[in-house]
Amino acid sequence: MPPADRYAVFGHPIGHTRSPCIHALFAEQTGERLNYTAQDVTPDAFETSVREFFANGGKGLNCTVPLKELAWKIADLRSEDAERSKAINTLALCQDGTIYGDNTDGIGLIRDLKINLGRTLESRRVLLLGAGGASRGIIGPLLEQGPSRVMIANRTPEKAVRLAEEFCGLGPITGCGLSDLGAEAFDLVLNATSASLTGELPKLPGNILRTGACCYDLAYGVEPTPFVRWGQEMGADISVDGIGMLVEQAAEAFFIWRGIRPDTAPVIDLLNRERRG
């Protein structure tokens, strides 16, 4: 029997990732043979590590913080979402040796919000915290859902404004500084900053949530993140982390690599039960 196809996730840090577990569950569910590992790869070593991985028989990669914008540069071919966002989280080796890049973060987020959490985005006000690679990957899919407004708020206001300008052709989107928040309330607040990875919380006013609002942290952990706890304390209708998005975006990457889309619900349920002990 030939060896299982090799896949991996690259990131820095990477110790917290659940991706190997998720893809092992997908493989078991679908009967696909693959070996998926996690590797700590710094930005300086990223391109060399990607080239070596594929040269040594690797078939596909996921790329997480802080490598998504670097992955965009390395791809020979890109999906429309990836081209637009300039951030890639999924790389696949094509038969001709070229590298295809896609960004499955956006579709993963939308599926989790709409299917798993039952939230609608049409005509809703959305606040997106952070203007880095994590934000880039979800703005296009968010605007495609028809929100009445998307506001990007970042510690450096200029970066948020520039990012909003890049996507303004897709819908109503503007940028501002975190310190400018407070005069408007939102139906959905998304934390795409790296603060949760270090146990921190962006400084936020307490009056930015509308009645029935949802708080969603793209990061995840064994315990609720500081942002999730903040949402709960502020009275959000739902305040959750990104474990559902992680599973949904992984399923889309699995489909790109293997041509099969696994069932995400039992995997999300298992991961949540493990976290509850």
Image: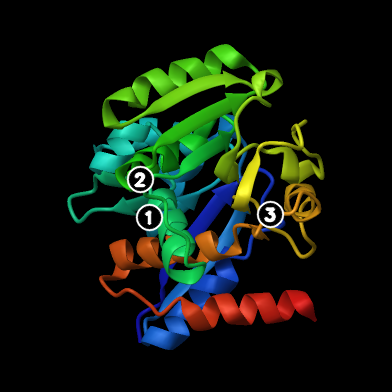
Q: Residue 144: which disc?
A: none
Residue at point 35% right, 40% down?
A: 143
Residue 32 percent location from the top left of the image: 37, 81
Q: Residues within 10 Å of mark 2 (few under 14, many from 20)?
A: some
Residue at point 73% right, 45% down?
A: 197
Residue at point 30% right, 41% down?
A: 81
Q: Residues within 10 Å of mark 1 (few under 14, many from 20)?
A: many
Secondary element type, mark 3: loop
Please state if 222 lies on the left or on the right of 123 as rendered.
right
Quadrant in the picture for the C terminus: bottom right
CA gap, disc 3 to disc 1?
Answer: 23 Å
Secondary element type, mark 1: helix
- Comparing 107 with 119, the one in front is 119
Q: How is the image coloured?
A: rainbow
Residue assigned mark 2: 141
Q: Is residue 265 above or below residue 153?
A: below
> Residue lying furthest top in this view?
158
Residue assigned mark 1: 107
**Labels 3 and 2: the sequence-earlier one:** 2
Q: Amino acid at mark 2?
A: Pro
**Labels 2 and 1: the sequence-earlier one:** 1
- Comparing 176 with 276, the one in front is 176
Q: Residue 236: which disc?
A: 3
Q: Amino acid at mark 3?
A: Ala
Q: Are marks 2 and 1 in contact (CB under 8 Å)?
A: yes
- Residue 55 seen by the camera: no
Residue 214 percent location from the top left of the image: 60, 53
